[in-house]
Amino acid sequence: MAIAGAGVIEDGVTLWGQVGVPSKVTVGRGAVSLVQSGIMSSVEGGKSYLGSPATEAKQKLREIALSAKLPEIVKKLGI
């Protein structure tokens, strides 16, 4: 985990392994940053984040699931 000197980590925040927080960024109260996330701008509290740059985990997981279906979609389209 890497937290820059001027990063602000509010109460109740959970940062799982390999999370980066640069200077002048605030991680809101109760936020959860999942593994290998890069928080590039301030994030709201009470939500979970994933990826680099970090976005809400729910959205990122949808993107990952859809990207796994791309070969099937391409095949159906005959591309």
Image (cartoon, helix red, strand yellow):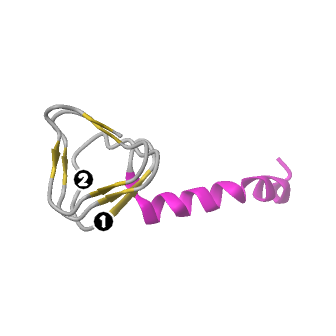
Magenta stretch prevailing secondary structure = helix
Does residue 23 sit above or below 45 in this rendering? above
Kindly identify the residue that appears in the image at 70 percent across and 56 percent down.
68
Q: Quadrant of the N terminus?
A: top left
**Relative to residue 16, is residue 71 drawn left or right?**
right
Residue at image location 39% in from the left, 53% down from the top: 16
* Residue topped by disc 1: 47
Task: Using residue 6 as the reference point, say whether residue 74 is left or right of it.
Answer: right
Q: Callout 2, which amino acid?
A: Val
Magenta highlight on residue 60: yes
Q: In the image, which disc is placed on residue 43? A: 2
Tell me, yes or no, whether the highlighted magenta stretch contains residue 40. no
Near mark 1 (Cα within 10 A), the count class, few <14, some 14-19 or many ≥20, is some
CB contact under 8 Å: marks 2 and 1: yes
Instruction: Please give the range of residues in magenta.
Output: 55-79
Q: Residues within 10 Å of mark 2 (few under 14, many from 20)?
A: many
Image x and y of residue 18, in percent: 43, 42
- Given residues 77 and 41, the one toward you in this image is 41
- Give the side of residue 35 with respect to residue 28, left or right: right
Q: Quadrant of residue 31?
A: bottom left
User: Which residue is at a point 72% across and 59% down the rendered structure image?
Assistant: 69
Residue 14's spot in the image, x, y percent?
Answer: 30, 58
